[in-house]
Amino acid sequence: GEDVEQSLFLSVREGDSSVINCTYTDSSSTYLYWYKQEPGAGLQLLTYIFSNMDMKQDQRLTVLLNKKDKHLSLRIADTQTGDSAIYFCAERSGFNKFYFGSGTKLNVKP
Amino acid sequence: EAGVVQSPRYKIIEKKQPVAFWCNPISGHNTLYWYLQNLGQGPELLIRYENEEAVDDSQLPKDRFSAERLKGVDSTLKIQPAELGDSAVYLCASSLRTGEVYEQYFGPGTRLTVT
């Protein structure tokens, strides 16, 4: 399968910006996604970006895509304690097949 | 609009016993996925349905796992017999294609513990 890599942990202070990084291997990926998972819950779709875009902004979320380096990032502005969760990036390869990273646990300190 | 519904939320069984999980996707979503999520890992696809057809079951351990999606709506995932290594969270998701975008929506999952 495809390889999607993420760093395991990120700790920030409330009010700071968080940047979660992801690398992927499939250059034919069409869409890349970010999901949030809170304890005991399923994954919640946050945002996605088409592979021919390099940036997408959605309220406090900014997605940056460097297709040449196969690098995706999610920036959360003004991070709040409610943003503490595990964040997964995923790539969609081929026809409707998703590959997920192992997740980055974001800890927001008050 | 109701989200993806899964039941049960938790299940504890002894090894070698059978177990079944049920999923009701979001109304109108043609695609249904079953994922396995081990602790500290991302979801891994077990099987994907387009309507009632299983179009990708390459990662489903067919010696003990089976799935069905009758009438292209609800789906059931079964394990028989369960092994200790099957302890994990089983996630169901559904998606609707909007242009080229597939937005997946996940249920809360079933946490299986095999003792």
Image: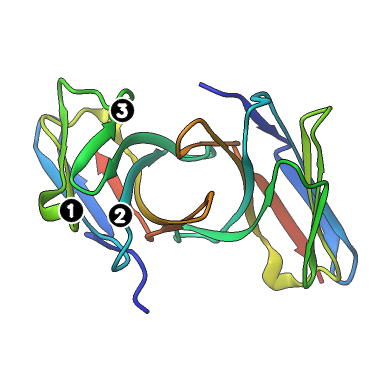
Question: Which comes before the other along the chain, label 3 or label 1?
Answer: 1
Disc 1: which residue = B72
Disc 2: which residue = B30
**Cβ–Cβ under 8 Å for marks 1 and 2:** yes
Position of residue B13 in the picture relative to residue A34 (left or right): left
The image shows residue A10, relative to residue A47, as above or below, that is above
Position of residue B102 in the picture relative to residue A15 (left or right): left
Amino acid marked by disc 2: Asn
- In the figure, residue B45 lies in which quadrant? top left
Q: Residue shown at 18%/51% (left/top)?
A: B75
Chain letter for mark 2, please. Answer: B
- In the figure, residue A96 lies in which quadrant? top left
**Cβ–Cβ under 8 Å for marks 2 and 3:** no
* Horizontal and vertical percent position of residue B65: 18, 30
Q: Are marks 3 and 1 on the same chain?
A: yes
- In the figure, residue A65 lies in which quadrant? top right
